[in-house]
Image (spheres, grey):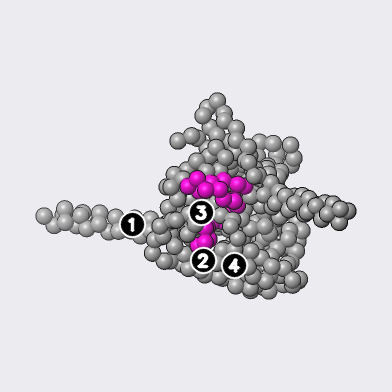
Amino acid sequence: MPGSFRYGRLVLVALLGLAIVLVLSQVGRRGNPNPRPVAYLGSDGVPEVVLKQNQLDQYVVTGRINGERIEFLVDTGAADVALPYEVAQRLGLRLHPGAVSKTGNGNVRSWTAWLDSVDVGGVVAHQVKATVLPNMAGEQALLGMAYLKHMEVWLAGGRMRLRPYVGP
Amino acid sequence: MLFGAWISGLALLALFFHQWLERENNPNPNPLTVQGTDGAVEVVLQRNRAGHYVASGRINGEPVRFLVDTGATDVALSLDLARRLDLRLGPEGTSRTANGITRTWPTRLARVELGGLVAHGVRASVLPNMPGDEVLLGMSFLKPLELIQRGDTLTLRGTLP
C-alpha cells in the first residue's frame, strides 16, 4: 500500500528531525544553559536572577565584566573572580604581579586585578578582586566568592537564585 | 629558670597562634547541626577570611577538611589522601582545572559526612597535584541538598536517608 508507506516515511522523517532537535538542545545545555539571564524584581523589590544547571550539574551563565560579555562558572571554591591571562589582556586590565594561587593542579604564580563591575543579568557588584592565571584554558571565568559574598545565593533542585544581600 | 619560663611562654604563644591561624582557615572544626521537626538536617558554616566555606568532616570515617565548591563536578581529593584512605581507583582520565589540564582517576566514596549530613556512594575524582589535604566538596555531594548563603554564613539543608 503506497499510501501507508508514504505516511510511515513521513513519521520517520519527523522522528529524525525531533531527535536532531533534542540532541542539539542537549548540547547547548551541556555548556551554557543561561546565555541571556535577566533579573526580575523579587517580592521585596530586590532584583534576582535564576540560573539553570547544565548537564555536569554546574551553573554556567553569560555575564559582563566592565561591560564586556563573558561566560562565568559559578564557583564557591574560587576566592576571587578567576580569569585566564588572555581574557584579562582583552579586557585591558592592569595586572599586579606577586600572588600565588592554590589550584586543583598545584600552586601557580598569578596576578591580581580589580574589576570595576561584575554583572550577572543585572545583579551587579563593584570593585571586585580578580586573580589572573597563566595556564587557565579557554574563555570561561570563575565567578568566585569576591562576587558571591555580596549576594544571597540559594541553590536547590537544579536552580540557583542570586540577589544582592541587603542584610538581616 | 627565667630562660625556661621564656621558652615555655614562647611555645604557648606559638601554640595560640597556630590554633588561631587554623581557625582563620577553618572556622568550622565542629559544624553545627540542627535537626528540624520535619526530619530535615541543617548544617550552618561560617565563611573564613579568604572568603571560603571550609569545614571538618569525614570520608569513610577518617577526618578530613572540606572546601565547599560548586565549581567542582565531583568531590575532588589528592592522590596522597586517596592512598591513605585506601580507595580503589578507576581508569585514568583528564580533568580541567584553573591551572590547566590534569590527570585524574575516578572513584566512589562509601560514606561522606559533613556534620549531620551523610551521603553514600559519592562520585569523586582523584588529582595527582592537588596541594594540601583539603578536599573539594563538589556537586556530586551538594546536588541533593539545598544551599543558602546569606551574609557570611552558608546553610546546607538535606533530609535524612
Number of numbered tags placed on the structure image: 4
Identify which residue, A24 or A135, lies in the foreground. A135
Q: Which chain is indicated by disc 1?
A: A
Does residue B69 belong to the magenta stretch?
Answer: yes
**Amino acid type, label 3:** Val
Distance from Cα at disc 1 to Cα at disc 3 = 33 Å
Query: What is the chain letter for disc 2?
Result: B
Closer to the observer: label 1 or label 3? 3
Residue A14 image point, x, y percent? 29, 56
Q: In the visual, does B129 lie left or right of A87?
A: left
Compared to A45, does A24 lie above or below?
Answer: below
**Residue under the point 56% across and 54% down:** B135
Of badges 1 and 4, the one in the foreground is 4
Residue B19 falls within the magenta-colored stretch: no
User: How dense is the environment of label 2, judged by Cα within 10 Å: few (below 14), some, or many (20 and up)?
Assistant: some
Q: Are marks 1 and 3 on the same chain?
A: no
Q: Residue drawn at (47%, 59%), measured in percent from left and top?
A: B83
Instruction: Say which chain tag 3 marks.
Output: B
Residue found 41% across the figure and 66% down from its top: B92
**3D distance between C-alphas at marks 3 and 4:** 17 Å
Residue B93 image-quadrant placement = bottom left
Q: Which residue is mark 3?
A: B75
Q: Which residue is mark 1?
A: A19
**Residue sitting farthest toward the right:** B2
Pointer 4 chain: A
Residue picked out by circle 4: A106
The residue type indicated by label 2 comes to Pro
